[in-house]
Amino acid sequence: MTTFAVTAAGGRLGHLVVEALLERGVPAGDVVAVVRTPGKVADLAERGVRVRRGDYDEPDTLREALAGVDRLLLVSGDTPGQRVTQHANVVEAARAAGVQRLAYTSILRADTSGNPLAPDHRATEEALAASGIPTTVLRDGWYLENYTEALGQYLAAGEVVGSAHDGRVSAASRADYAAAAAAALLADDDGDRVHELGGPGFTLAELAATVSEVTGTPVAYRDLSTEEHVAHLRSVGLDEGTAGFVAALDASLAAGELHTDRDDLQRLIGRPATALADAVRAARA
């Protein structure tokens, strides 16, 4: 019997990974949902999943949560600047628990990217390499939801505003990445693996065109310089730091750091990634 654990199982990605494991036939009793607030996953507990409290900032809880776990998915934390220490706590707890394989949700091109989110992921990958635990690195691209959740904003404004120029983004749905993580946990891999994950690439101009086609409402892409983008974001209410951060993400997109031509995602999930038009159509519905 193999015991699987998923951290941050109360979050949207972690919850989907647990569901994906169950859909792939893993018995609920062989799955551990590690969460900071167990009450958030009462639905999983009702299905027989073992729920354990584990807080990235409390190493003692992690050691208890990972006892007896064979394969672990470490879902990256959501607080830049704190994640390196938080992730190191999980890695050390996994090492102490004798975890046999650890998968980690990183970012595309983490080893070379200038994306402002990349340093935390790069440091975590280095910690994993030093841990001695066989590791599967899942370098996830952007979520389609990053765009579809802004659909109402695009339609109201009649435009998508950015500074990505003609950079392509390899986005896929959160469910796609969850399915890939489940597949990686179930795979009988030897040694370390690195997967660059993303769906079919598109530019922000193509995003606007797709929104127009699917909804019937004209939406254009307005491409700005980084400085103009920051000024625009400030004008709609973002503070200086947040505006600079968002513009830096588009600069990373413009540099091609959020695009991959590799088919790792499709191979892992055994089907094409969710198409942009389908994601927009679902969000519209």
Image (cartoon, rainbow, N blue to C red):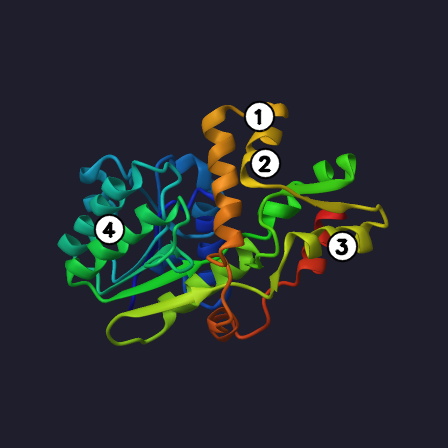
Question: On residue 83, which mark appears?
Answer: none
Query: Identity of the amino acid at label 2?
Result: His
Asked if the residues shown at circle 2 and circle 1 are in contact, with their CB atoms under 8 angstroms apart, the answer is: no
Q: Which residue is mark 4?
A: 66
Disc 1 versus disc 4: nearer the observer = 1
Q: Earlier in the sequence, mark 1 or mark 4?
A: 4
Q: Which residue is mark 3?
A: 209
Question: Please, is residue 171 above or below residue 119 in the view?
Answer: below
Query: Identity of the amino acid at label 1?
Result: Arg
Q: Earlier in the sequence, mark 2 or mark 4?
A: 4
Question: Crowding near pointer 4: few (<14 within 10 Å), some, many (20+)?
Answer: many
The residues bearing labels 3 and 2 have C-alpha atoms spaced at a distance of 20 Å
Under circle 3, the secondary element is: helix
Q: Which residue is mark 1?
A: 234
| Residue 40 shown left or right of residue 225 in the figure | left
The one of 38 and 214 positioned closer to us in this rendering = 214
Q: Position of residue 114 (x, y in %)?
A: 39, 50
Q: Quadrant of residue 173?
A: bottom right
Q: Which residue is mark 2?
A: 229
